[in-house]
Image (tube, rainbow, N blue to C red):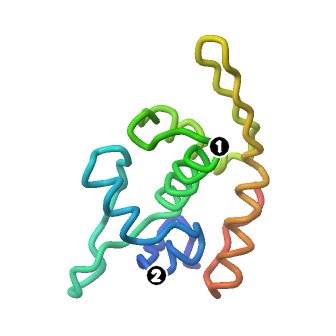
Amino acid sequence: MFSFADRSYTAAVAEAVTGVPGATVRTWRFRDVLELSGDALGLSGHRGYSYHDLAKIAAMSEFVKIGFFPGKVSWGMVESLALAILHRHQYVHRDGLATITIDAPALWARLCERLEDAAMEVPPDA
């Protein structure tokens, strides 16, 4: 059986699932504010994204939505929220006087729903 973890998602699917335009993802990568696996897809040379990459893109998008500038979001913050999404745990970030709580399980549910809408394989509940 083909597992979601073994699947590579196209840029079009990544955009449909995360709501983040491909040009924005390329800009984040170019400016070193987002690190993705970026495995190539076959002979086409087009970039493919893992499910973990989709979670990272969704994480960066969530930070931007709540007011962070992309350049001010550390890779560690993105990775921590991505893992919280994948494992369906609440995310809490404390920085100085500010505490940010993000509902990562809701983000995971949204990703799964959009993957279903894109007719892609959805990861099973753990």
Q: Residue 12 shows which numbered tag?
A: 2
Along the horizontal axis of the image, is 106 left or right of 121? right
86 vs 99: above or below: below
Residue 76: % across, % down? 46, 32
x and y, in percent, of residue 106 in the image = 78, 54
The foreground one among 110 and 8 is 110
Image coordinates of residue 32 in percent, x first then y, are 28, 45
Looking at the image, residue 94 sits to the left or right of residue 76; the answer is right
Quarter of the picture holding the N terminus: bottom right
* Residue at the image point whose x is 43% and y is 33% from the top: 72
Any mark on residue 66, and which? 1
The relative height of residue 29 versus residue 39 in the rendered view (above or below) is above
At label 1, which amino acid type do we have?
A: Ile
Left or right: residue 80 versus residue 100 is left
Alpha-carbon neighbours of circle 2 within 10 Å: few (<14), some, or many (≥20)?
few
Packing grade of label 1 (10 A; few <14, some 14-19, many >=20) is few
Kindly indicate whether the residue at mark 2 contacts the one at mark 1 (C-beta within 8 angstroms): no
Vertical placement of residue 44 versus 94, above or below: below
Q: Residue at x 58, y 44 (%)?
A: 63
For marks 1 and 2 on the same chain, the one whose residue lies earlier in the sequence: 2
Q: Secondary structure at mark 2?
A: helix
Measured along the vertical axis of the image, is residue 114 above or below residue 56?
Answer: below
* Quadrant housing residue 99: top right
Considering every residue shown, the one lying at the far top of the view is 96
Work out whether residue 54 or residue 97 is closer to the camera in this orientation and state it: 97
Q: Report, in whole angstroms, how far the alpha carbon at label 1 lies from the one at label 2.
A: 24 Å
Query: Could you tell me which quadrant the C terminus lies in?
Result: bottom right
- Camera-side residue: 74 or 8? 74
